[in-house]
Amino acid sequence: MSLRSLEEFPRSVQDFVTRNERQSLDPQYLEREAGKDAHWIYEESGLPWLKLAIEVPCAEMFQEALAWTEHMIEQDYPTLWGKDKKQEDAAQQGWKTICLHAIDGDMHKFDRANMYGYDHEDSAPYQWTEVAHKSPVTKAFLESFPYAKLYRARFTMLEPGGFAAPHIGRKENADYSHKISFALNHPEGFAFLYERHGCIPWRAGRGFLLNVDENYHCVLNRSNVRRIHLITMGRPDWEKIDPLFKQSYYDVDPRENLFIHQS
Ligand SMILES: [Fe+2]
């Protein structure tokens, strides 16, 4: 299968891929410490990512997402890339989204609560959107997920040739800003790379807890297929999420899920 040339992408993306695609998760994150709970795993482990011991109904959710691709909008984050960055290099292209759960139930309010005038994610009026009401499988999955409060949930698409240049998340105004993201499809040629830790070992249906606020990362799609995921942010219900996080931490061997670069 032929992939799009890396040279089609901006210099910053090319450099990031070249520097990191042969990296692998730092060995310190392959070890497991005994007796830890969900709160520690989320807050203190420092794990760049954790593969969750869960499979999602990705085929059905992918079909539900496809119905909304025409309504998705470009993710233009005014505060994510600095002004200089925006001027010197394209920040993103073909990186689109639509919300199932959003402030005021507005399917296009995809950014953090503070961008819409709220002090904190917990005080923002998050509601289901029309997208959720018409995506019953995805909505049921989100309702079943052990969050005490779901903040944003959205379908996000990276078009063929699309990318998000290297960036790091924002921790302000959110105590629980880790993302939990599920691949609804996964064409070969899509990559989600971390600085120093290489590629996340995605497959369709896999979900990961992502610490993107403390790790520079970059995504690109060198395939000819649109790649869609379901991405969520919320305050965990520590008691309910404990079995899932513990199972993911102790029972999923991270060595078996390392991404091995094949040139
Ligand atoms: Fe990001």
Image: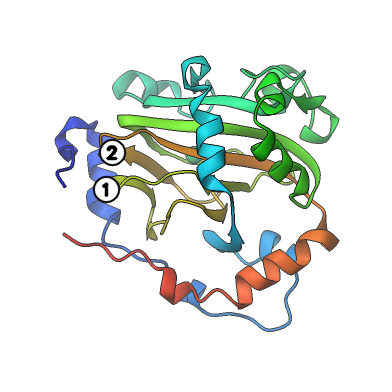
Q: Is mark 2 within 8 Å of ligand 1?
A: no
Left or right, 167 with reference to 177: left
Q: At label 1, which amino acid type do we have?
A: Val
At a point 63% along the width and 26% down the height, the residue shown is 99
Side (left or right) of 84 relative to 222: right
Relative vertical location of residue 187 with respect to residue 103 in this rendering, above or below: below
Residue 44 vertical placement versus 228 (above, below): below
Q: Position of residue 251 (x, y in %)?
A: 60, 77
Question: Can you give x and y, in whole percent of width and height, for residue 111 in the image?
Answer: 62, 26
Q: Residue at x 66, y 39 (%)?
A: 137
Residue 211 makes an appearance in the image: yes
Tag 2–tag 1 contact (CB < 8 Å): yes
Whole-number angstrom distance, CA of label 2 to CA of label 1: 6 Å
Q: Residue at x 35, y 63 (%)?
A: 259
Circle on res. 13: 2
Label 1 sits on a secondary structure element that is: helix
Q: Quadrant of residue 196?
A: bottom left
Q: Looking at the picture, how far across and down is residue 106, in whole percent?
A: 70, 17
| Position of residue 22 measured from the top left corner of the image (x, y, whole percent) | 26, 61
Q: Amino acid at mark 2?
A: Val
What residue did someone put label 1 on?
17
Image point 75% across, 18% down: which residue?
117
